Image: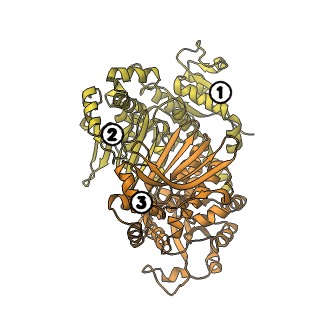
Chain colours: A yellow, B orange
């Protein structure tokens, strides 16, 4: 049976999640896809530290070493920030590897460039994991766009802030207390700035803008308001009125063709679709011309949801080959 | 440019919707998919009645005539009931045509048989439109199943009953009044039995059961309770308590491996994900092992939502070829 060699760049929560799922699902993926997947290399910053038993021999600190792997075909990337991630993926694509990324900062800034490069090299860029964790919003929107036009996309794109707002309301916790809990559960980064300031949701929104409209608004003109200004008193007052705070990211294409985007807290009542979306759940709603309003809701954070959609990206890429072989 | 010839079986609401979308999107589909789509034949029971201006020359009352079309590659089916639909699609598949159906009764009963036949003949069966109208639950679940296991599927699968329950609550209408309105809007069939009895939702649930678990429960053992027994008084009472009636279809795989399914009205409070799902909207929630709980919500009825996902099925099938050509 054909074997496909893959590399994992970055071996933190998500990278390890990918490794675990690929092992747990080895047999099933082989049966479903007709190919064997082998993780041949794992790129880390400190190869002396074995994070998962039995992976030491796979670890390397050099991207040259990764790309030197004979017949490498798939690269999973779970690093944070634009660089060196983009440079690594660029080299992987030029080496004819399909790339699957969870890196929203890199993709928001360089995604269109990476996609163009991938097209030239005849490979795919899987980026389902960059937006809304385990929620398959990218695949859903790509599919919708085959026939429909999307005019507006609105949603909760950051699990940490939704978790914090939920706990402040349901448990009466302070912002700081809820944040500490989110960090202990591994939802929030050690530096929570990107989550609570709305910058993380903003990057995801820009990725959705590129997908829905083929362009992004001028970043400098987008208003981004975080949740760090919301007090326990405000939350209690809203709750007393039957309202809930949600941190909503929205991008729409206006009549004149300009793209308008915004990230800000929003008070919703129990008629609003986002009202029951609690904890780390994310939700994305899009307005389309034929289908109408479509929403997808699910866990927006966590090791397995994110890693799972990356393995699905891989399976989908392989499936395209399988699918075609069948249709010949 | 390559031209793909398609036929439409049944030219009612959905069949006409397909025709309109294919015409409106002709240019765009050509650019996106790199192939020209031509509707070469339309099968109807009375070819003397021109339903859409300019289609008379395409209409025929004979399936032999449809299949006699030189190099026919795609068949859209929008007929109701098992036969003659299944026999038509069987013949189309044997003639190496990809088939795309909206026929839930046929697919619930003969879907596994049709899929097996399609595999042998190297063609695809698109059936997104058989469940939840414009909500892409089939594609979403197929994709999730590449990596995840699904343990339970729950949802509102019939737009007509949800519309009726919504109007009884929001407008204070009687069941009969809400039903008449649903029929005037084209949501409910002339004979509303299948909708209000839960039989329509049951068929859709069986399709989801086949997809999620590879099998269906014994139909005779599935409890199916409709909404026709719910009185205006009961609805008013529920509303006074802050509760809402939803008509919920559910199928789950139990610990011992048996499949348990049920269709019945359910009272939900404002913490329940189905609480804000009003009018003809459908919603499907699935429990998965890696991702967790995932929900998709959108319009469950109407000409364009249903026709749109059928054209998406077509685009996806063509896309598999395009996708592969790129990856060679």
Residue drawn 39% across the image and 73% down it: B184
* Residue at the far top in the pictured view: A48
Label 1 CA crowd tier, 10 Å (few <14, some 14–19, many 20+): some
- Asked if labels 2 and 1 touch by Cβ distance under 8 angstroms, the answer is no
Tag 1 residue: A40
Q: Is residue A184 above or below residue A272?
A: above
> Where residue B325 sits: x, y (%)?
59, 51
Cα separation, mark 1 vs mark 3, equals 56 Å
* Chain bearing mark 3: B
Q: Is residue A127 above or below residue A14?
A: below
Label disc, if present, on residue B139 of the rendered structure: none
> Where residue A191 sits: x, y (%)?
38, 20
- Asked if labels 2 and 3 touch by Cβ distance under 8 angstroms, the answer is no
Tag nearer the camera, 1 or 3: 3
> Where residue A153 sits: x, y (%)?
36, 47
Mark 2 lies on a secondary structure that is: strand
Label disc, if present, on residue B165 of the rendered structure: 3
> Where residue B1 sits: x, y (%)?
52, 64
Res A288 seen here: no
Tag 2 residue: A249
Q: Where is the C terminus of chain A found, in terms of image quarters?
A: bottom right
Cα separation, mark 1 vs mark 2, equals 38 Å
Between B266 and A192, the residue placed more toward the observer is B266
* Chain bearing mark 1: A
Between A251 and A267, the residue placed more toward the observer is A267
């Amino acid at each position: 049976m054909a074997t496909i060699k893959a590399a994992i760049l970055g071996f933190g929560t998500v990278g390890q999640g990918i490794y675990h799922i690929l092992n747990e699902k080895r047999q099933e993926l082989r049966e479903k896809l007709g190919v064997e997947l082998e993780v041949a290399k794992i790129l880390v910053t400190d190869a002396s530290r074995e994070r998962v038993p039995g992976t030491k021999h796979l670890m390397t600190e050099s991207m040259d070493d990764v790309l030197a792997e004979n017949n490498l075909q798939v690269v999973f990337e779970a690093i944070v920030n634009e660089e060196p991630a983009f440079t690594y993926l660029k080299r992987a694509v030029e080496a004819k590897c399909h790339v699957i990324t969870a890196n929203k900062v890199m993709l928001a800034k360089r995604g269109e460039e990476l996609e163009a490069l991938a097209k030239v090299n005849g490979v795919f860029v899987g980026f389902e994991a960059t937006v809304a964790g385990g929620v398959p919003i990218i695949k859903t929107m790509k599919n919708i766009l085959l026939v429909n036009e999307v005019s507006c996309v609105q949603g909760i794109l950051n699990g940490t802030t939704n978790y914090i707002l939920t706990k402040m309301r349901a448990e009466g916790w302070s912002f700081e207390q809820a944040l500490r809990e989110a960090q202990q559960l591994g939802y929030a980064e050690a530096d929570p700035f990107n989550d609570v300031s709305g910058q993380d949701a903003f990057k995801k929104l820009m990725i959705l803008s590129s997908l829905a409209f083929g362009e992004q608004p001028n970043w400098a003109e987008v208003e981004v308001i975080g949740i760090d200004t919301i007090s326990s008193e405000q939350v209690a007052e809203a709750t007393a009125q039957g309202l809930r705070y949600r941190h909503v990211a929205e991008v729409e294409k206006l009549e004149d063709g300009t793209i308008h985007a915004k990230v800000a807290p929003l008070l919703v009542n129990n008629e609003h679709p986002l009202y029951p979306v609690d904890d780390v759940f994310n939700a994305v709603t899009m307005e389309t011309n034929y289908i109408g309003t479509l929403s997808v809701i699910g866990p927006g954070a966590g090791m397995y949801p994110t890693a799972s959609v990356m393995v699905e990206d891989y399976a989908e890429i392989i499936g395209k080959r399988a699918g075609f072989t069948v249709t010949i």
